[in-house]
Amino acid sequence: MKKAKDAPSLADLAWLFLKLGTIAFGGPAAHIAMMEEEFVRRRTWLSEADFLDRLAIANLIPGPSSTELGIFIGYALRGWSGLIVAGVCFIVPAALMVTVIAWSYVRFGSLPPVAGILYGIKPAVIAVIVQALWNLGRKAAKTKWLAFVGLVALVLSAKGLIPLVVLAISTIVALATVPIPRRKPGVRSLVPLFTPSGFAAIVVAAASTPINLVRLFFSFLKIGSVVFGSGYVLLAFLRSEFVEHLHWLSEKQLIDAVAVGQFTPGPVFTTATFIGYVVAGARGAVVATVAIFLPGFVFVAFAGRVISKLRQSPLAMAGLDGVVVGSLALMAVVAWQLGRAALVDWYALAILLVSATLLFRYRTNSAWIICGAAIAGLFLTR
């Protein structure tokens, strides 16, 4: 295993996650790709194997997977203080942007025009994801069997199977060639660690108070405790809670909230920040943001303590390898879906090819590529 260099200072860690939280457009797959570039290839603070292990666990627990990966990285590099600093610094830039947009939305009743920026950024984001898949895939598919597992996961995900089921099947298939060892005394099952029901049961019961900040907090705490998967899964939970059950939002307001979470950088879960502001102003934005991300910190704090133990068991190691290649397959399908939506003309294709050339040939920092693509998008859509 490639060993990481000396751990960075908390200030370095904070600065890097603030940067990522400010320029990481494109959703979880893009965030993961940018983290791989910054922490594995550019600074070598983590080995590829360590990065992939944390990516696998982040996909197995509820909440925003890319944000939880960032929290995992902070914990791996600087312990408990790194866990908090990494998570907060990745979330805050997006939350502040969304709060400003929400203020404008409440005052003027519409979202700002961002079509030009997104037009340029989306092709560049695809190039960033493809580069990360190339780098991580070579490490993850270390045997022909694991390459086959990744192919199975790719097909299942492309057919529309939900991510958690794809990861479960990847784990089972990866274990097919591993002899099951006898259970050693004192070894406890790790499965309950990834079951959100215990934590969620507490907050589900609490989410029945009158309409106020407390109710808002527990509603988002409940959602953050049980949501797996993409922003579309989050949409279903938000609609059930705030449109159908509480009647705090209209359908249009909910769609606008999800749109804001999609086109701003950083975590998609900052949709909660927008809803909190619309419902209860600035205090509501803070309460909603804290509530939806808090479970992720809790889950990572528990899961981070068992990663090294997983690699000591041949059976657990094989299962984790299956989750790793399954996770990369999910990223590949997301990249394909983004590509179909983003490559609408020859200009978009040109942005993709230029971005890929800068990344693969000249190893240009993705932050500069994203900024350049945004400027090109504004210019080309004028």
Image: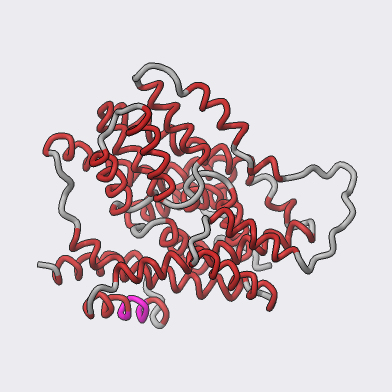
User: Where 283 sits versus 66, above or below?
Assistant: above
Q: In this view, does 111 lie to the left or right of 186?
A: left
Which of 165/349 is in front?
165
User: Where 42 sits versus 260, above or below?
Assistant: below
State the image quarter where residue 131 is shown.
Answer: bottom left
Q: Residue at (48%, 61%) from the top-left corner?
A: 160
Q: Is residue 168 left or right of residue 84?
A: right
State the image quarter where residue 172 is shown.
Answer: bottom right
Q: Residue at (70%, 47%) from the top-left corner?
A: 306
Q: In which quarter of the image is the C terminus?
A: bottom left
Check the image and tell me how it is coloured: secondary structure
Which of 308/39 is in front?
308
Q: Is the magenta stretch mostly helix, strand or loop?
A: helix
Q: Residue at (13%, 35%) from the top-left corner?
A: 107
Residue 17, magenta (yes or no): no
Q: In this view, does 179 lie to the left or right of 3?
A: right
Q: Give the range drawn in magenta.
A: 353-358
Residue 83 point in image, percent of width and height: 53, 43
Q: Residue at (58%, 66%) from the top-left corner?
A: 153
Q: In this view, does 327 lie to the left or right of 130?
A: right
Residue 312 point in image, percent of width and height: 78, 56
Q: Is residue 144 among the parts visible in the rendering? A: yes
Residue 282 point in image, percent of width and height: 27, 29
Q: Is residue 369 among the parts visible in the rendering? A: no
User: Where 272 sits versus 308, above or below?
Assistant: above
Q: In which quarter of the image is the N terminus?
A: bottom right
Q: How many labels does the image show?
A: 0
Residue 84 point in image, percent of width and height: 50, 40
